[in-house]
Image (cartoon, helix red, strand yellow):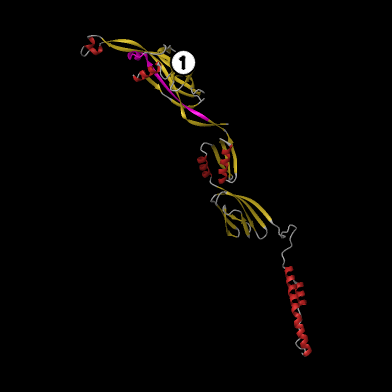
Amino acid sequence: MTRLSSLLKNLTPRRPTSNATPNDANASAATNESTNMFPKRVIYFCVCMTLAGYVCADPPLDGDGQAGINVEVEHESLKLRSTEQRTLVLPFNVRRLFFGDSQLLKVEPLSPTKIRLSALKPGKTEMRLFSAQGHVQLYDIVIHASLAELKNVLAREFPNEQLAISELNGDLLMSGRVSSQPVIDRIERVATEFYPQVENHLEVVQRVIEQQIQLKVRIMEISHLQLEKHNIQWPLSATKIGKMEHEVVGQSDKLRSFLKAAADKNLFKLVAAPEMLTIDGRTVEFEIGGKLPRVTPNDDGKIDVEYEPWGLKIAVLPERLANGEIRLSIKPRVTQVDASQRTKALHRGLPQVRHHQRDVLANLGVDEQCLIYGMPLVREHETKEKIPLFSDLPLIGETIYKSRKIQEKIDLLILVEAIELKTERIATAP
């Protein structure tokens, strides 16, 4: 600046002194000098402006064409939930800022060092903050929606898929099994509308249509004595103690007529009537009964009590055949308590227990049933018969009678029916 002032001083034009005596020649010279000063003043003005511009110019540029200021850039990631607001407190005064998408993010300066961010909808954007000293703060901003809202949408749009979603550090983690790759792509497209960053671990599994089969089982007892009283003939072969047989009940045969006639007379004593729902190739089991105590002495004179189960346990495996029939593999296990046969333990008679197990295989068509029968029990009944004249006497006649023991044979009946339902069950298998 000193050199500039000196230069300007030397370039300043000098005026003539006021004590000179003017004459005609001097007046003419003064007029010429005034005329020649105009271009000098123009030159003077241009030189001053050039020097002033040189002194006040911007600092020299570096090799990249940027101003010679040290620029520091810091990078940071932000994850916001949709509709969330967050205030950033910065260590420097923000001179200017830039952010990408105003539809995703709203930026409000609160002070030179504070900025409030408002997340509007899910997506990705960035924001840059600049200071006067050359400091640049860069933010990568990810905005995601509510996890509960995404779960509701996926459950509504993909009800038959097995999905598990969770949030991990602001990102979405998806796992589970779905039916096809296009379904995975559709689920991922929906998920990215809520979470810009998605970790997809979904697997494709094969979809298997499984036909449901309903099994109706009726476990009954029937007395041959009651059949004789009602003149109903037993249509099957004679049963043997400890043995079981089976027959297929057709749509119109003697066995179906027998079952209907006995049911109309209420001759069946219903023990249990379970109904079980299964699928083709899956075994179901049913069990009824109880436990019978067994008392046995040991060597030290004490008594040991063991409980032996009794009753009926049945397992049924249905298989659908190509001709439309259903093949039933039935395995009944019967444990009977026979009060007519007793064992001796500690001089006390206890009922005898009999076991029988059978493996039945039967193919059933429409409206057909499988009947498993046998394991007869013999029960004794004592009946009272009047004695002519004496039993009709007043007051004492009721006490005069003749007793007679009657043996009653009771057979066990197990009736199994398989019904193929129209509704289908969808299962998944890898």
Image coordinates of residue 86 in percent, x first then y, are 56, 53
Q: Nearer the viewer, residue 48 or 423?
A: 423
User: At x 74% / y 76%, what residue is drawn?
Assistant: 42
Query: Looking at the picture, does residue 27 appear above or below residue 386?
Result: below
Can residue 123 be spotted in the picture? yes
| Residue 125 in magenta stretch | no
Q: Main secondary structure of the magenta part?
A: strand
Picture quadrant of residue 376: top left
Can residue 94 be spotted in the picture? no
| Residue 222 in magenta stretch | yes
- Graded by Cα atoms within 10 Å as few (under 14), some (14 to 19) or many (20 or more), the crowding at tag 1 reads some
Picture quadrant of residue 52: bottom right
Image coordinates of residue 10 in percent, x first then y, are 78, 77
Picture quadrant of residue 46: bottom right
Tag 1 residue: 355
- The reply, left or right, for residue 222 in relation to residue 89 is left
Image coordinates of residue 390 in percent, x first then y, are 23, 9
Image coordinates of residue 157 in percent, x first then y, are 51, 40
Total numbered labels: 1
Q: Nearer the viewer, residue 164 or 161?
A: 161
User: At x 79% / y 89%, what residue is drawn?
Assistant: 25
At mark 1, the secondary structure is strand
Quadrant housing the N terminus: bottom right
Type of residue at label 1? His
Quadrant housing the C terminus: top right
Query: Looking at the picture, does residue 341 appear above or below residue 97?
Result: above
Q: Nearer the viewer, residue 405 or 258?
A: 258
Instruction: Give the farthest residue toward the left.
Output: 394
Instruction: Tell me the magenta residue range.
Output: 209-232
